[in-house]
Image (cartoon, rainbow, N blue to C red):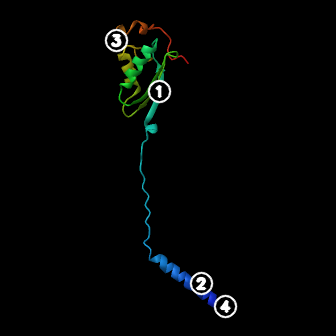
């Protein structure tokens, strides 16, 4: 008899609990998928040789590159004669970067520097056109 009463009591408690939960507004869950392109995902990094001699060359070369839309970082290494560039490939490309440097008077691996711009460089920046670049 105790088992029957206990069973009825358990069923009654369960009924009250389930009724109580039925009155609560149900939470709806939705899954939303968003696609977000982060700066890291859109960034392309390249490096290539650029002829030059000194700190003034470094400034001119880096300013030429930083003037191109989409550039996030440009660092020219005087000793290695090499530039490292990070950029948004949806806004520019490698050849545009080479062209910007060449326009400022400096040779790159793919383009000769503009002769008139080269002639207007300070004396310390007049590099040997046969110098090795992109030294590892």
Q: Which residue is mark 4?
A: 2
Tags 4 and 3 touching, CB below 8 Å: no
Q: Which mark is residue 10?
A: 2
Q: Which residue is mark 3?
A: 117
Question: Sequence order check: which comes first, mark 4 or mark 3?
Answer: 4
* Whole-percent x, y for residue 27 in the image: 44, 67
* Whole-percent x, y for residue 65 in the image: 39, 23
Q: Quadrant of the C terminus?
A: top right
For this orientation, the residue located farthest to the right is 2
Question: Sequence order check: which comes first, mark 2 or mark 4?
Answer: 4
Q: Quadrant of residue 63?
A: top left
Q: Quadrant of the N terminus?
A: bottom right
Look at discs 1 and 2 and give the one toward the viewer: 2
Q: CA distance from mark 4 to mark 3?
A: 104 Å
Q: Which residue is mark 1?
A: 46
* Whole-percent x, y for residue 21 in the image: 48, 76
Q: Nearer the viewer, residue 29 or 10?
A: 10
Q: CA distance from mark 1 to mark 4?
A: 82 Å
Q: CA distance from mark 1 to mark 3?
A: 25 Å
Q: Quadrant of residue 64?
A: top left
- How many residues crowd around disc 2 within 10 Å: few (fewer than 14), some, or many (20 or more)? few
Question: Is residue 110 shown to the viewer in this render?
Answer: no
Q: CA distance from mark 1 to mark 2?
A: 72 Å
Q: Is residue 88 above or below residue 133?
A: below
* Label 2 residue SS: helix
Q: Residue at x 44, y 74 (%)?
A: 24
Look at discs 1 and 4 and give the one toward the viewer: 4
Question: Sequence order check: which comes first, mark 1 or mark 2?
Answer: 2
Tags 1 and 3 touching, CB below 8 Å: no
- How many residues crowd around disc 3 within 10 Å: few (fewer than 14), some, or many (20 or more)? few
């Amino acid at each position: 008899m105790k088992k029957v009463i206990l069973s009825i009591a358990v069923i009654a408690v369960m009924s009250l609990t389930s009724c109580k939960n039925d009155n609560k507004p149900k939470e709806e869950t939705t899954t939303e998928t968003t696609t977000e392109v982060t700066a890291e995902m859109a960034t392309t990094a390249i490096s290539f040789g650029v002829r030059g001699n000194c700190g003034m060359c470094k400034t001119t070369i880096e300013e030429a590159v930083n003037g191109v839309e989409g550039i996030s970082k440009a660092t020219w290494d005087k000793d290695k004669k090499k530039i490292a560039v990070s950029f948004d490939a949806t806004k520019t490309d490698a050849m545009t970067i080479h062209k910007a440097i060449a326009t400022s008077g400096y040779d790159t691996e793919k383009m000769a520097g503009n002769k008139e711009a080269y002639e207007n460089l300070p004396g310390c920046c007049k590099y040997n056109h046969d110098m090795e670049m992109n030294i590892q």
